[in-house]
């Protein structure tokens, strides 16, 4: 990690601090978000089993078929509604949000708003 940027190191510190207190259970799994410069990914994870229950991203086939265009914030909201619909179809309504060290604004906030509108509670 010699060439790791201070911004990334700060995010990883925040991530460790958050993950100490957050874990997903069978009753209330963890909704985790990862964002890169081009894409955004979301997973609902049960940490007791160590299994991913639902996932969605901008690279999904279903997402690409809908051809959502616009700004990154609008695309993140569409991914949030996609993961929300998939979770409700599997019977998951309550989750805990793991923002993965990212600040709660912009794409992270937009994704969570889309998931809330689709029926997830957190």
Image (cartoon, rainbow, N blue to C red):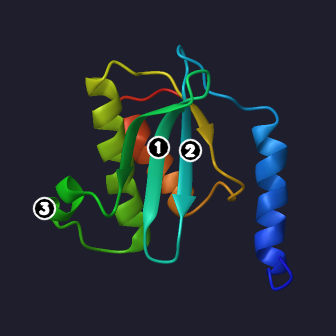
Task: State the residue lying farthest toward the left.
Answer: 65
In the image, 67 versus 25, the foreground residue is 25
- Residue pictured at 43% horizontal, 69% vertical: 39
Q: Secondary structure at mark 3?
A: helix
Q: Which mark is residue 32?
A: 2
- Residue pictured at 24% horizontal, 72% vertical: 69
Q: Is residue 84 above or below residue 73?
A: above
Q: Quadrant of residue 41?
A: bottom left
Q: Secondary structure at mark 2?
A: strand
Name the residue that disc number 1 marks. Answer: 43
Residues packed near mark 3 inside 10 Å, few (<14), some (14 to 19) or many (20 plus): few
Q: Is residue 33 above or below residue 122?
A: below
> Is the Cβ of the residue at disc 3 closer than 8 Å to that at disc 1?
no
Q: Is residue 82 left or right of residue 15?
A: left
The Cα–Cα distance between marks 3 and 1, rounded to whole angstroms, is 20 Å
* Label whose residue precedes the other's in the sequence (1 or 2): 2
Residues packed near mark 2 inside 10 Å, few (<14), some (14 to 19) or many (20 plus): some
Q: Position of residue 60 (x, y in %)?
A: 27, 57
Q: Position of residue 117 (x, y in %)?
A: 36, 37
* Label whose residue precedes the other's in the sequence (3 or 1): 1
Task: State the residue lying farthest toward the top.
Answer: 27
> Is the Cβ of the residue at disc 1 closer than 8 Å to that at disc 2?
yes
Q: Is residue 38 left or right of residue 86?
A: right
Q: Which mark is residue 65?
A: 3
State the quadrant of the N terminus: bottom right
Q: Quadrant of residue 61?
A: bottom left
């Amino acid at each position: 990690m010699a060439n790791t940027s201070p911004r990334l190191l700060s995010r990883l510190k925040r991530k460790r601090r958050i993950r100490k207190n957050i874990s997903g259970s069978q009753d209330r799994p963890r909704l985790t978000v990862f964002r890169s410069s081009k894409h955004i990914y979301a997973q609902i994870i049960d940490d007791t089993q160590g299994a991913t229950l639902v996932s969605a991203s901008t690279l999904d086939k279903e997402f690409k078929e809908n051809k959502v265009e616009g700004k990154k914030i609008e695309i993140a909201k569409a991914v949030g509604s996609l993961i929300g619909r998939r979770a409700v179809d599997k019977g998951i309504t309550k989750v805990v949000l793991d923002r993965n060290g990212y600040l709660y604004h912009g794409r992270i906030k937009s994704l969570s708003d889309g998931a809330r509108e689709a029926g997830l509670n957190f």
